[in-house]
Image (cartoon, rainbow, N blue to C red):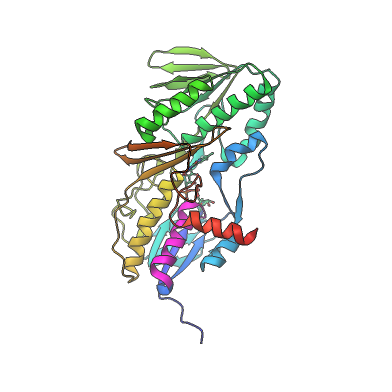
Amino acid sequence: MPTAPAAFKAVIAGGGVAALEGALALRDLAGDRLSITMLAPDPDFVYRPMTVREPFAYGRAQRYSLSDMTKDIGVELREQSFAWVNPAACVAYTDSGEELPYDALLLALGARIHTRYTHAYTIDDRHLDDILHGLLQDVEGGYVKRLAFVIPARMAWQLPVYELALMTAGRAFEMEVALSITIVTPEESPLAIFGSGASEAVSKLLEEAGIKLVTHAYAEVPQWDTVVVHPEDKRLEFDRVVALPELYGPAVRGLPSAEHGFIPIDVHAKVRGVERVYAAGDATDFALKHGGIAAQQADAAAEAIAALAGAPVEPQPFQPTVYGMLLTGRRPRYLRAHVTGGYGFSSEVSEEPLWTPPRKIVAKYLAPYLERFEARCA
Ligand SMILES: Cc1cc2nc3c(=O)[nH]c(=O)nc-3n(C[C@H](O)[C@H](O)[C@H](O)COP(=O)(O)OP(=O)(O)OC[C@H]3O[C@@H](n4cnc5c(N)ncnc54)[C@H](O)[C@@H]3O)c2cc1C
């Protein structure tokens, strides 16, 4: 006999880490107490951290079919964009005007990438190979001898800058070409968010690779070959400059907005002051943008939503731990720290994996799920 459709409707907007982790967590915690609809305009889930290898000809980052994954998890996929929400009526709207009534809404929309410096190559993982492949060829040909990587004051994800710098230094070494690399960053030490132990280990790695570091630096890039570092107003000259973008939030119509359009959330990932609406990941006002953090927020939201749906779950507040697998061009380094008030403590660093499966994005449900999904598709 066919089972009756679940009365409780969960709607998830997004098709990235937070959305998939949220869907898997909801299925685990609330089973068939709820139906899940996912709104995602792109056909694939892209494993964004691995895009840093694309310019080095390691092949494309993994892409997984959202249609296959959602079918497998028991989620109805609509290949449409979420547009806005009317929280008083508990209705979400798609960009084609379709109405989706919900009992709980999880917004996992990611952040918007904005170029901070017009005279630099901006790291944009949607086409990192196109952006950096030519630059690497110029390094290999000996045409680029002084290269800067710049992190703007409002930091996006810092890890890829260090990975790109280390991998580029490794490539120049292999090709026996002279290359001076400088990282210019507002951080007090490299990857400071991972705590002092990890940061010291990263400093040592950079030193061994001959990479210079300018910390506490607020940079401007007035020309293609110049970086001005404040507060000293020091001018540094380079052949090329690569920079992180700045991130902006999705500025959702119908919801309160924090600075720069991010969605304000509490410790249960509930949107502040709004009932039955949750948000997770890069779209939120949590300062640290990282895949593992996105997953932890999605887990907190899923617990709260499962409890609303009547599952026997005690929602726990989100307690951020940051995990980083730093690609170096040789053996990766595994970094881990708890985060409070924007600082990492209980810092750990190792050449051996500190978690299983040893993936770049550490996510309670999504990481083991991808292992199983890959094994089945192999
Ligand atoms: C180069 C690079 C390297 C990184 N390295 C690491 C790493 O090593 N470890 C780590 O943990 N993190 C890393 N990160 C960060 C990590 O990828 C992000 O923090 C993570 O992807 C955020 O997940 P999210 O679900 O919030 O957003 P996203 O992954 O950006 O997903 C957002 C989703 O929402 C969809 N969407 C957008 N607008 C709409 C709409 N209107 N309606 C419906 N859907 C919409 C998008 O199509 C996408 O599917 C890296 C990021 C980059 C760019």
- Quarter of the image containing the C terminus? bottom right
Q: From what the image shows, is residue 122 above or below residue 299?
A: above
322 relative position to 159: left or right:
left
Q: Nearer the viewer, residue 192 or 106?
A: 192
* Residue 313, x across and y down, in percent: 31, 66
Identify the main secondary structure in magenta. Answer: helix
Residue at 41% over, 21% down: 217
* Residue 31, x across and y down, in percent: 42, 71
Magenta-span inclusion, residue 280:
no
Q: Nearer the viewer, residue 43 or 62?
A: 62
Within the image, what quadrant is residue 28 found in? bottom left
Within the image, what quadrant is residue 274 found in? bottom left
Residue at 60% over, 18% down: 179
For the record, the magenta segment spans 15-31
Q: Nearer the viewer, residue 187 or 286?
A: 187
* Residue 159, x across and y down, in percent: 48, 35
Residue at 57% over, 42% down: 50
Residue at 41% over, 36% down: 349
Asked whether the viewer can see residue 71, the reply is: yes
**Residue that lies at the very extreme toward the bottom in this rendered image:** 1
